[in-house]
Image (spheres, helix red, strand yellow):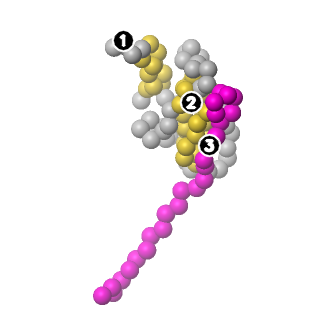
Amino acid sequence: MKLAVFKIAAGEPVRSFDTPAVPVFDAASSLLRWTGDGRALTYIVTVGDVSNLWSQPISGDPPKQLTNFKSNRIFSFDWLPNGRQLILSRGTVTSDVLLISNFR
């Protein structure tokens, strides 16, 4: 899977980038956000049950990890208007199974 940047009037990408070589990178469910200065795309990478934010500069430089969380998943994030701070929500994903038998 790749990320690509297009000019609105052009049909070919201006730049394209390989996605991170990690077990889970789902572009359909990962939020993509421009940094405040418009020089990079920011996205979530989840390995196991731990998410971190990464930044892909559109200059073609290698991606860099922005956060270094050791637990929990990131559900959503966005840059604040000043472009130097971000806000995010993170936590755990849990699910329960309940078996009901002999129901009348």
Q: Secondary structure at mark 2?
A: strand
Residue 35 x/y as whole percent = 59, 26
Residue 104 visible in the shown view: yes
Residue placed at 53% from the left, 61% from the top? 94
Q: Secondary structure at mark 1?
A: loop
Please state which of the two labelled residues, at mark 3 or mark 2, is closer to the viewer. 3
Closer to the N terminus: mark 3 or mark 2?
2
Which span is picked out in magenta?
Answer: 80-104
Residue placed at 60% from the left, 53% from the top? 91
Check residue 39 in the rendering and tell me which mark sits there, or answer none: none
Displayed quadrant of residue 101: bottom left
Closer to the N terminus: mark 3 or mark 1?
1
The residue singled out by tag 3 in the image is 88
Disc 1 marks a residue whose amino acid type is Ala
Residue placed at 40% from the left, 77% from the top? 99
Displayed quadrant of residue 7: top left
